[in-house]
Amino acid sequence: MSVTIAVQLVVNGILLGGVYALAAFGLSLIFGVSGVLNLAHGEFLMGGGLLVWLAWDLTGLNPFLLTAMIAPLAFGAGYLFEKGLIRPLAQRKEHVRLASAVLVTLGAALMMEDIADFLSLNTQYEKSVDLFLPTIVLDKVYLPSLKLVILGLVLALIAGLFLFLKRTYLGLAVQAVTQNRRGALLNGVNTVRINAIAFGIGTVLAAVAGGFEVVDTYVAPNIGLPLTLKYLCIIVMGGLGSFAGVALGGIIIGLGEAIVGFFQPAWGQTVAFLLLVAILLIRPKGLFGR
Amino acid sequence: MKRAHALLLLLVVLLLAIPAAPIESRTYVLQVLTFMFVSVVLAQSYDIVGGQMGYVNLGHITFFAVGAYAFGILFNLNMGLLASLALGTAVVVVFAALISYPFFRLRGAYFSLAAFGLVKLMEQLTINLGWLTGGSNGLKVTPGNRVLAMYYASLGVVAAVVVASWLIERSRLGLALKTIREDEEVAEDFGVPTFRVKAQALILSAVFPAIIGGLYTWYINFIDPNQVYGLSVALTPVAMAMLGGSGVLVGPVLGAVFLYLMQELIYTQTAHLHGAMMGLVIVLVGLFMPGGLVRLGPVARVLRRLGLTVEEA
């Protein structure tokens, strides 16, 4: 294997892992705050992607601009999702709550997938936005500038999320609830509201990632649950609730898929799950778990 | 208890007699009931780990799928029905024993997720190991008309899994499982060998899906990865057990019967949006029935009168 190919694979892996990490951050935020594994997370990504596609098809505006425009919509959707479906489960015993949350979010995921499928009858199944940007060639390594733009936006969003979590009152409240719900409550944090806000922000991240996906590859009604599983792998691998872990998990999975997919295309999709099982064997609470 | 016995006897006689009943479209009825029995076995066996022990095992379907594939491969080697079933089940038991060590190092949400990941992993392995499993083209076994035989066989497995759950619940093992569900640390401090107990429970809950998986392959002659590992297939038993009432003996049975009939109704009566309607049913169960059907007031009263205890969720 030549050095060029190795560098190319690493570049591809990081570009792939970036978008994974973005959506996985959203899922991790939701889990950290509310303790709920949101199996409908990938559906919000799918929904965001389809909305961007629809708006682009109608108006022809820049898809990145459209992605920014659907963000408030996604926030509202996530907020209401929490309010209607997750909040009623809060008082249950722990293992009952885990199972109920699985059922509710799974049922919602099935519904969203089927409705999206129904609405896209008579149109092409896999929707993508054509946006051509030139590819930069740097010493035989191909750098698709579209992916670079996306990676830049992902990094900017992650930086923004960090600033939000570290610098604003709301962000600190989110962190406080993640660390200790009762302690946060005793210090005057409105934990119920924080739950809904975390769902809103997490959903925005998923929908934005969907906007990137529809530009970069494609979005179809059936991509939701498999993606949710991949994100779950990423956040469990990194350690539930750890942001550094999510970033590392996203990169590891992106690299793994790029490298294995290059040599054995059929095994590319297996990597995430094999890595997850392998890492959990060594560290049962994930790479950064406490 | 006597009334419960009489009712049970009546039910058994009725189910045994159905194939002889002079009804139209007998084959269809038998088929619907057979698939219902498959669902009951999956839901009830899930509940040994999911309900009695409180570990939400989202990967339960892997036992069914591995059993189905192991049976198909062995049966195609001309092993004969019983030998293939026995060996296929043995394969699944070994599989369950092997995964119990890594997976039970995890708890709560971690366990559920890793188990869910296992479904996908096994599906990918099945697709990629084409020389063994036929890959995404699926696996065929020699066909035959097995409607009647399968009806009785699956009914037998239903009986076996219900009796086994009942015995487990009353045994020392059942007590250990319940202790683990309520508080694993305390259980360990009081001398419950948690690791061994959890492995035993997982193996016991794997045996029945393995058998029914083998029979399933034998019955429908053809399986492919999506059919046995598909996400909705994988998660329906969990939903059924929850719907009926996890942790109560007849809960998963009721849930499986109810949800299966619901599914059959939705699929035969409406043209579109089957998945959305199933999703809605699952959402409503999760939202409004944490304890499941068996803990609803009127149902619980009837069950108590029949001598079946129903604890609070």
Image (cartoon, helix red, strand yellow):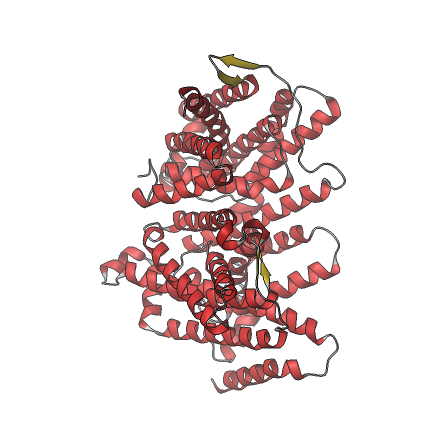
The picture places residue A242, in percent across and down from the top left corner, at: 37, 34
x 32%, y 45%: residue: A281
Numbered disc total: 0
The reply to whether residue B294 is in sight is no
Corner quadrant of residue B149: bottom right
Which residue does the image show at 41% across and 22% down from the upper left? A2
State whether residue B117 is above or below residue B68: above
Tell me if residue B89 comes above or below residue A127 in the rendering.
below
Q: In the rendered view, does B134 fall on the left or right side of B99?
A: right
Q: Position of residue B225 (x, y in %)?
A: 55, 53
Q: Nearer the viewer, residue B212 or B190?
A: B212
Which image quarter is the N terminus of chain A in? Answer: top left
Q: Residue at x 39, y 71 (%)?
A: B169
Q: Quadrant of the C terminus of chain A?
A: top left
Corner quadrant of residue B13: bottom right
| In-front residue for pair B219/A90 | B219
Q: Is residue A43 visible?
A: yes
The image position of residue A116, as x and y in percent, is 67, 41
Most foreground residue, A140 or B158: A140
Q: Position of residue B307 (x, y in %)?
A: 47, 80
Identify whether A29 is placed above or below A57.
Answer: below
Between A130 and B307, the residue placed more toward the observer is: A130
Q: Is residue A11 above or below residue A136?
A: below
